[in-house]
Amino acid sequence: MESTGKLRAFKILNIAGSYYRGHETNPMLQRLYGTAFTNPKQLRLYMKQVEEAKKRDHRRLAKDLDLYSISEKVGPGLVNWHPKGSRIRSLIEDFWKREHFKNGYDILYTPHVGKANLWETSGHLDFYKEGMFAPMDVDGQEYFIKPMNCPFHIEIYKSGLRSYRELPLRWAELGTVYRYEKAGTLHGLFRVRGFTQDDAHIFCTQEQIEGEVKEVIRFCNMIWKTFGFTEVKAYLSTRPEKAVGEPAQWDQAIKSLEAAIVAEGLPYEIDEGGGAFYGPKIDLKVKDAIGREWQTSTIQFDFNLPERFDLKYIGDDGEAHRPYMVHRALFGSLERFFGILIEHYSGGFPVWLAPEQVRILPLSDEQLDYAEEVLKALREVEIRATIDSKPGKLNGKVKNAQLDKVPYMLIIGGKEQDNKRVAVRHRLQGMKGESSLEEFIAQLKKEELEKTTVDMEVSD
């Protein structure tokens, strides 16, 4: 800043001790952490966002809702998914697979380890070895746990002679990878050492590339909006000073990426020279319920690996050609995406993602038999439901369901049992009135099908 006078509004956030020049023999100094804005309104909005973010911290909510844990005995950065978290993950994966099949992808499965020469060819041992776990000896040869899925997909491509008639090939995988992240950088689900990438690779011809990129952008945008993220922005990174690949290839790739962004109507910025050395890319960023921006999907051209692995296809001229290769991560990783999702919804997942959609609350033991009938009817139509059969007053049972963020409660008393009906309570909207079980199931299924997200917890 030209002067501190431009900082019209500031706030001290934290105070800590710090040894001068980082040496413990030196005097202890006071370190002040703060933030500043050009006007008080901006500062108030920021501090409100900070407070709301603390309430939504996925690490705290995950513990309260029993979604996952990270055990020192298992290892830092390695996630144990609990039953409720696993149910949500399973729902996400099932949706992910269905949509990929609908959009012309094939699903792959690849090993968790590969021989050293695979990683030598890919360049990982030259450029990324510090991020890989130590090798293991198998039959006198070094094997590494995979940090990425790309070389395996490439080896599948190379398993046979490819023709232009086969292209494009769209291959996706929920592949679990392992990367050595320094202990100080680990943070809940946002930075871990073992995670599942929703990886995809597209192999296509030069003529197909623009159409493929447009389809990828459309696909990503649709997925994010389905999960309740309505504000999506693209960032296009172009050729750096040092790069592989012909300039003409880069120019065409950048034009294809920009045309795809424009065609989908997304706002975007260009990061001149910000691309990786092996190709330009698009990063998509989404805003969550409290206005924070998250970097999510990546669409990355790669002019390097097709050369390293000598990828070819036979064109309509009968000659061998080099295919275009595009990496595409939609969520990035399921772990990080799940962390974002927890904070976006403040743990109160919409009906279609909720691990427990309905909790049945009988007023007394006399209603337990009817409650079991209701439970059976719900489970027969694949509604995720439980019964709170513990002794106690209704208010306590409702409070527990609210704390567990269960979308719907079905209250059953003597009257409901006699009339074969249920009293419906919504977590955010309160009592909805009495209903037949058939009517309630139809309404819930409609919400599930439409993937309704209108009842999110958002700050004012």
Image (tube, rainbow, N blue to C red):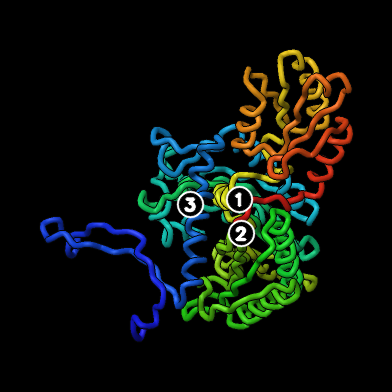
| Occupied quadrant, residue 212 | bottom right
Give the labeled residue for mark 1: 341
Give amino acid for label 3.
Lys
**Lower sequence index among marks 1 and 3:** 3
Residue most extreme to the bottom: 2
**Lower sequence index among marks 1 and 2:** 1
Task: Indicate the position of residue 374 as horizontal and vertical percent values.
Answer: 80, 24
Give the labeled residue for mark 3: 54
Query: Which mark is in front, 1 or 2?
Result: 2
Q: 441 or 271: which is nearer to us?
A: 441
Q: Residue at x 71, y 63 (%)?
A: 221
Q: Residue at x 26, y 63 (%)?
A: 31
Q: 422 or 133: which is nearer to us?
A: 422
Q: 81 or 213: which is nearer to us?
A: 81
Please indicate whether residue 441 sits to the left or right of residue 216 in the image.
right
| Occupied quadrant, residue 228 | bottom right
Q: At numbered mark 3, what does the secondary structure look like: helix, strand or loop?
A: helix
Query: Which mark is in front, 2 or 3?
Result: 2
Task: Look at the picture and state if 55 lies above or below 9.
Answer: above
